[in-house]
Amino acid sequence: MTILSDKDIAESISNGCLGISDFIEKNLTPNGYDVTISEIKINGSDTIYKEGTVKIPARTMAFVSTKERVRMPDDMCAQLWMRTTWMRKGLIGVFGKIDAGYEGTLTFGCYNTNDHDVEYPIGERFCQIVFETLSSASIKSYEKRSGHYQGSTGIVLDPLKK
């Protein structure tokens, strides 16, 4: 596997191999792309926040979706990493791998480890996607295997496809 540089990411988007909707040049990092918060749902609440600043209570899990939709080619996957800005505020990210062939927004979790609330502004950069090339294209990419969350939009906690 090879990690894509900023140059590789920009070229992959330009030639249509990789897709990132609402691409913002300043979110491109030397070896990844910072995705932004579109929605927040605090665990145990039915409310989904789509604007303003949201307070995550102490010792509470929250779910976050991205503004950006990603479209992964069959020969690329990605890792998600919490931005150190949030780690320094006492948050822990709960991430999975973005599979080859996935298309949609991303939903992930975060946990406030503090004894006090932490504020999350909608639209703020939250985590970094680090793209990796596979040694060869997958035989069956995500949408052809389980594809449970293929086409996700917003916070999705239950599989779209069973």
Image (cartoon, grey):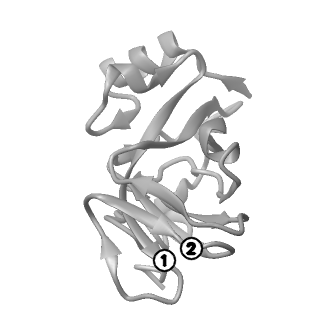
Which residue is under mark 2? 57
Disc 1 residue type (three-letter):
Ile
Estimate the x, y position of residue 126 in percent, counting from the top left.
50, 45
Q: The N terminus appears in which quarter of the rendering?
A: top right
Residue 161 in view in this figure? yes
- Compared with 127, 33 (above or below) is above
Q: Above or below — where is 132 with respect to 146?
A: above
Q: Nearer the viewer, mark 1 or mark 2?
A: 2
Tell me which residue sits at (40%, 64%) in the image: 54
In the figure, residue 154 lies in which quadrant?
A: bottom left
Q: What element carries label 2?
A: loop
Residue 150 drawn at (x, y percent) = 41, 64
Residue 83 at x, y percent in the picture: 61, 39
The front one of 45 and 28 is 45
Query: Alpha-carbon distance for marks 1 and 2?
Result: 8 Å
The amino acid sitting under disc 2 is Pro
> According to the image, label 1 marks what residue?
42
- The x and y percentages for residue 124 are 40, 43
In this view, the residue in front, 89 or 122, is 89
Horizontal arrangement in the rendering, residue 78 relative to residue 68 (left or right): right
| Nearest the eye: 114 or 15 | 114
